[in-house]
Image (tube, rainbow, N blue to C red):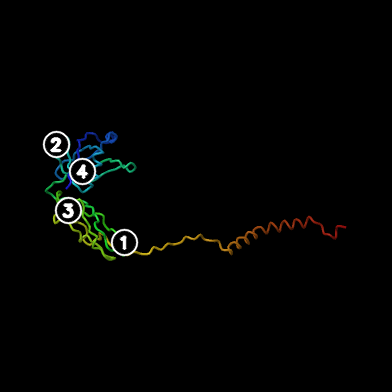
Amino acid sequence: MEQIELRAETRDVFGKKTKRLRRSGLVPAILYGPRAEPVSLQVRERDLRSVLDRAGMNQLISLWIDQADRPRMTLAREVQRDLITHSLLHVDLYEVVMTEKITAETPLTLVGEAPAVATKAGLLVRGLASVQVQCLPSELPEFIAVDVSALEEKDQAILVKDLVVDEAVEILANPEEVVVKVLPLRELEVEEVVEEEVEPAEVEVIAVAKEREEEPEEVLEEAEQVEDEEPEGEAE
C-alpha cells in the first residue's frame, strides 16, 4: 500500500481570523478520533490538495504534527470546498486505531471487457460506484475490482454478493444490490418536429370574421352618401 504523508501545524487562529490563513495558502483542519481529544491544525493547501487526490476518502494518511517523532494514522472524513473557486476551506481528519475495525466507502473499478457489449447485445449500466466496507485500517482496500468479462448476454448482472474481496474485509451493502448489469439495446425513436401549419379553413374564418367587424362601418358610410345625393328626378 502506498505511503501517503501530510505535515501539519497546530493552529491557534479561529473564527473569522481563519480567512487570513486561507489568504496565506493555509487550510484550517481538525483532527479527532475515538481515543484522542480534538486538535486544531493548519496545513498547506498545495500539500493537502495533493494528498487528497491520492488518498481520497478511504486511504490512510500519515499525519505529522509539528515536531512529533511519529505520525498519527488518519482518514479524510469531510472536505469543504468553495462552491465557485473549488479552493479548500476546511478538512476533518479522523485518527484511526490500527487494532480496531473502521468503516469506509470504497470505490468499485470495472476491469475487463464485457462480451455482451463487444457483440452489441447490450449496454453496460452501473448500479453502484462504491460500497461501504468494514475492516482493520491496515486491510482497507484502495478499490474493489469488478471483472465484467463474464457478462456475455443481455440481462446478466453482477451483484454485491459476487464481489471478490479479502477475507479480512466485510462488505456492508445489500448482497442482492446490482453493481453492474447488461441492458438490451433498444432502437431510439427520433420524433420529427414539424411546425403546425394553419389550415386554409381557419384563414377563411378569420377573414370572414374581419369582414363582419368592418361591415357596420361600411353600411353607415353608404347611408350617409345616399342622404347627401339628391334623386335624379328632382334635379330638373
Q: Secondary structure at mark 2?
A: loop
Q: Nearer the viewer, residue 145 or 99?
A: 145
State the image coordinates of residue 173 (x, y, percent, origin top left): 21, 57
Frontmost of labels 1 and 4 is 1
The residue drawn where x is 22% and y is 55% is 131
Q: Does dot 4 land on a helix, a strand or a loop?
A: strand
Residue 205 percent location from the top left of the image: 60, 63
Disc with the residue nearer the chain's start (4 vs 3):
4
Q: Is residue 69 above or below residue 2?
A: above
Give the class, few, some or many, for how many residues have Cα within 10 Å of label 2's Cα (few <14, many ≥20): few
Kind of residue sitting beneath label 1? Leu
Look at mark 1 in the image and give the residue it sits on: 123
Q: Secondary structure at mark 1?
A: strand
Question: At 26% across and 65% down in the image, what residue appears?
Answer: 152
Q: Give the residue drawn at x 33%, y 41%.
A: 85
Which residue was labeled with disc 4?
93
- Disc on the earlier residue, 1 or 4: 4
- Helix, strand or loop at mark 3: strand
Q: Amino acid at mark 4?
A: Leu
Q: Earlier in the sequence, mark 3 or mark 1?
A: 1
Cα–Cα gap, marks 3 and 1:
32 Å
**Cα distance in 3D space between marks 1 and 2:** 53 Å
Q: How many residues crowd around disc 3 within 10 Å: few (fewer than 14), some, or many (20 or more)? A: some
Question: Residue 165: which disc?
Answer: none
